[in-house]
Image (cartoon, grey):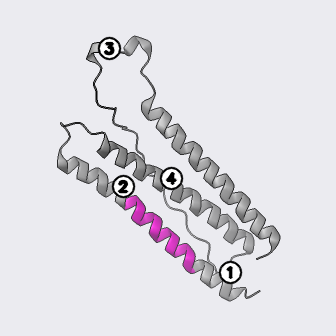
């Protein structure tokens, strides 16, 4: 790869990581944001258990890796950036589900906790599958562009 391409990939990766960190921080902030003053219960009635996040949203459809045999260098760089961003979203989803399990009260059944764990694990499985698919396309790209 050229120096320009390496710079663009590094710049894109940095932007994706920064966006992912901002997303995670916003999710954490949203999960612990206090209720409006008018809706707050008296201090004595406040539960001791941390609130369970209820807005864990599985990311939209997975991006499709570029076809390495015919993709340009720019296509591969963009594909990397998009896939990396999606993987960060999957990791945030898993962290949210894990938080739900960790902060669940005694009224939450073991089956419910297991379902949340399975959903988080599904996100990791999808991230691994996507990374493997992109790695295969990188191999095809390198074979088609031996320089």
Q: Earlier in the sequence, mark 1 or mark 3?
A: 3
Badge 2 element: helix
Q: Earlier in the sequence, mark 4 or mark 3?
A: 3
Instruction: Tell me the number on the disc at residue 43.
Output: 3
Q: Are marks 4 and 3 in contact (CB under 8 Å)?
A: no
Per the model, the C-alpha gap separating discs 4 and 3 is: 35 Å
Image x and y of residue 142, in percent: 67, 84
Mark 2 neighbour density, 10 Å: few (under 14) some (14–19) many (20 or more): many
- Image quadrant occupied by the C terminus: bottom right
Per the model, the C-alpha gap separating discs 2 and 3 is: 34 Å
List the residue tagged with mark 4. Answer: 89
Q: Is residue 126 left or right of residue 6?
A: left
Magenta range is 122-136
Mark 4 neighbour density, 10 Å: few (under 14) some (14–19) many (20 or more): many
Q: Is residue 130 magenta?
A: yes
Q: Residue shown at 19%/37% (left/top)?
A: 106
Query: Looking at the magenta stretch, what is its main secondary structure?
Result: helix
């Amino acid at each position: 790869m050229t120096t320009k391409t390496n710079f663009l990939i590094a710049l894109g990766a940095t932007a994706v990581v920064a966006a992912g960190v901002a997303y995670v921080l916003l999710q954490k902030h949203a999960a612990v944001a206090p209720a409006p003053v008018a809706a707050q219960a008296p201090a004595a009635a406040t539960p001791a258990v941390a609130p369970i996040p209820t807005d864990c949203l599985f990311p939209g459809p997975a991006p499709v890796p570029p076809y390495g045999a015919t993709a340009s260098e720019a296509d591969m760089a963009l594909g990397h950036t998009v896939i990396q961003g999606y993987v960060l979203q999957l990791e945030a989803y898993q962290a949210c589900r894990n938080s739900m399990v960790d902060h669940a009260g005694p009224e939450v059944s073991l089956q419910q906790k297991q379902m949340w764990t399975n959903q988080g694990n599904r996100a990791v499985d999808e991230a691994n599958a996507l990374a493997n698919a992109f790695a295969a396309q990188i191999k095809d790209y390198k074979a088609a562009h031996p320089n």
